[in-house]
Amino acid sequence: MGFSDADMMGRGGKTGSGRQSSESQENQMRRERLRKLALETIDLNRDPYFMKNHLGTYECKLCLTIHTNEGNYLAHTQGKRHQQNIARRLAKDAYEQGLGFQPAAPKEMKVQRKSAKIGRPGYRVTKQRDPETGQRSLLFLIDYPEIEQGLQPRHRFMSAYEQRVEPADKNYQYILVAADPYETIAFKVPNQEIDNSPSKFFTNWDFDTKTFTMQVDPS
C-alpha cells in the first residue's frame, strides 16, 4: 500500500527533501574525491600561486583567497574561478610576450590604446652570497629611464609550464618584469622555493633614477 503526499506530510516528511539531500551528498563526495586526487597527483612545491602565510593558513596568490589547509587549497584549484583566472593570466602573458594573443577586454570597460613598445630595458644581474650563512641570492637592477609617467614596474613569478616560448623544464621558473612602454622581460632562474622574508626578498622602485631593484633569495 502506497502513501499519498498528504500521508507523507503527516509523518513529518517534506516532498523532495530526500532528493535534495542526496544531491548535496553526491556533490560533497565529488569534491572529496577531487581533493584526494589532487593531493596524490599535485606537487604544491611546484605551484607558483601556493603560499603559506605567517598565520599558518594558505593563500592563492592568483585568486587572492585564503584556505585553512592544503586540501582546501587544492579543492579551490580544481574550481571554475581558479581555472578561469589561470586562463586569463596565460592570455595576458602571451600577449605581453608578443605571442599574438590578446585577452578580451571586459564589456563594461573601455579598451585603452597600448603604448608602442620601445624595446627592452637595460639590466644587470649580480650573483651574491651571504658571507655568514653561505646562502646565495640574485640581485636584479633594471633601468626604465623612459617609463610612462605615474607607472612603476610590476613583477611576478611564472612556472615553466605557463610559457610557450621554449620547451617546459620543471627545474626552472621565470621572473617577469613589465613596465610600459618597454617590452616585458623574463629571467630564467632555478625552480626553488623563494624565501619571502623581508630580509631575503625585496623590491624597490627609485623614482629619481628610474631603477627597479629586486633581490631574490631561494631558500
Image: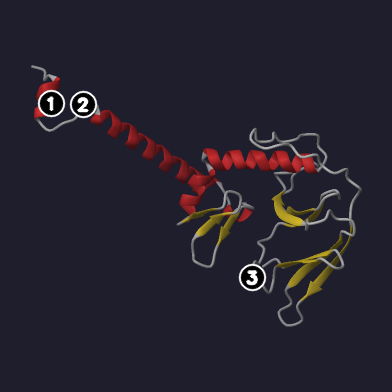
Q: Judging from the image, what secondary structure is the residue with disc 2 in? A: loop
Residue 52 falls in image quadrant = bottom right
| 18 on left or right of 115 | left
What amino acid is found at the position of numbered circle 3 in the picture? Ser
What amino acid is found at the position of numbered circle 2 in the picture? Thr
Q: Is residue 150 above or below residue 20?
A: below
Return the residue nearer the eye: 113 or 167: 113
Residue 19 falls in image quadrant = top left
Of circles 2 and 3, the one toward us is 2
Q: Position of residue 43 (x, y in %)?
A: 58, 51
* Quarter of the figure that contains the C terminus: bottom right
Q: Earlier in the sequence, mark 2 or mark 3?
A: 2
Q: Which residue is mark 3?
A: 197
Q: Position of residue 175 (x, y in %)?
A: 75, 55
Return the residue nearer the eye: 31 or 3: 3
Residue 157 appears in the figure: yes
**Residue at far bottom of view:** 132
What amino acid is found at the position of numbered circle 1 in the picture? Met
Q: Earlier in the sequence, mark 1 or mark 2?
A: 1
Q: Which residue is mark 1?
A: 8
Q: Judging from the image, what secondary structure is the residue with disc 3 in? A: loop
Q: Which residue is mark 2?
A: 15
Are the residues flagged by discs 1 and 2 in contact, CB closer than 8 Å?
A: yes
Badge 3: residue crowd in 10 Å (few <14, some 14–19, many ≥20): few
* Quarter of the figure that contains the N terminus: top left
Real-space CA distance between mark 1 and mark 3, rounded to the nearest whole angstrom = 62 Å
